[in-house]
Image (tube, rainbow, N blue to C red):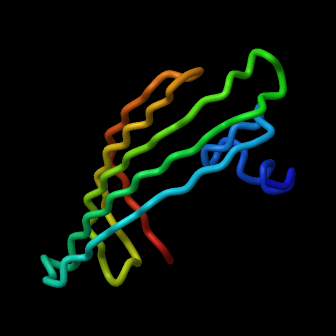
Amino acid sequence: MSDAKKTLYDRLGGYDSHYGTDDGGYVLGSYLFPTPVGVGRFEVLGKFAAARFREGITSLDADYNQKTTELNLNYVIKQFNARVMMFYKDTRFDAVKVNSKQVGVGIQVQI
């Protein structure tokens, strides 16, 4: 990955600037229920991602793998102009970092 891309996404998309090599990918699936409920429709979304971090810049930067599972329940309003979401996110590491779990609620509005 180029340095420009690494700098742009550092700490935003899971990239770790302490490693010379990082790669991964994800699978995402969602289903928007066709029947309206009130002013919107419900959507379920699932995502699984895996990443590998290698070639640390110091001897203290051990190689590690990261796996993330995310489940969302969204209420989509006016063709994706707004949504209310509930999510669960489970991030696991095989070394270096501590596993984490998150549960949250969010609101998104597009103008």
Position of residue 16 relative to residue 62, above or below, is below
Which corner quadrant of the image does residue 103 belong to? top left
Residue 15 in picture, x, y percent from top left: 67, 43
* Quadrant into which the N terminus falls: bottom right
Position of residue 35 relative to residue 61, above or below, is below
Along the viewing direction, whichever of 14 and 105 lies nearer the viewer = 14
Residue shown at the point (40%, 63%) measured from the top left = 28
Along the viewing direction, whichever of 82 and 65 lies nearer the viewer = 65
Residue shown at the point (44%, 43%) measured from the top left = 68
Residue shown at the point (72%, 44%) measured from the top left = 10
Which corner quadrant of the image does residue 34 belong to? bottom left
Along the viewing direction, whichever of 111 and 42 lies nearer the viewer = 42
Q: Is residue 105 left or right of residue 25?
A: left
Residue 95 in picture, x, y percent from top left: 55, 22
Q: Is residue 87 left or right of residue 36?
A: right
Q: Residue furthest top?
A: 60
Q: Is residue 33 left or right of residue 64?
A: left
Which corner quadrant of the image does residue 101 belong to? top left
Residue 12 in picture, x, y percent from top left: 63, 47
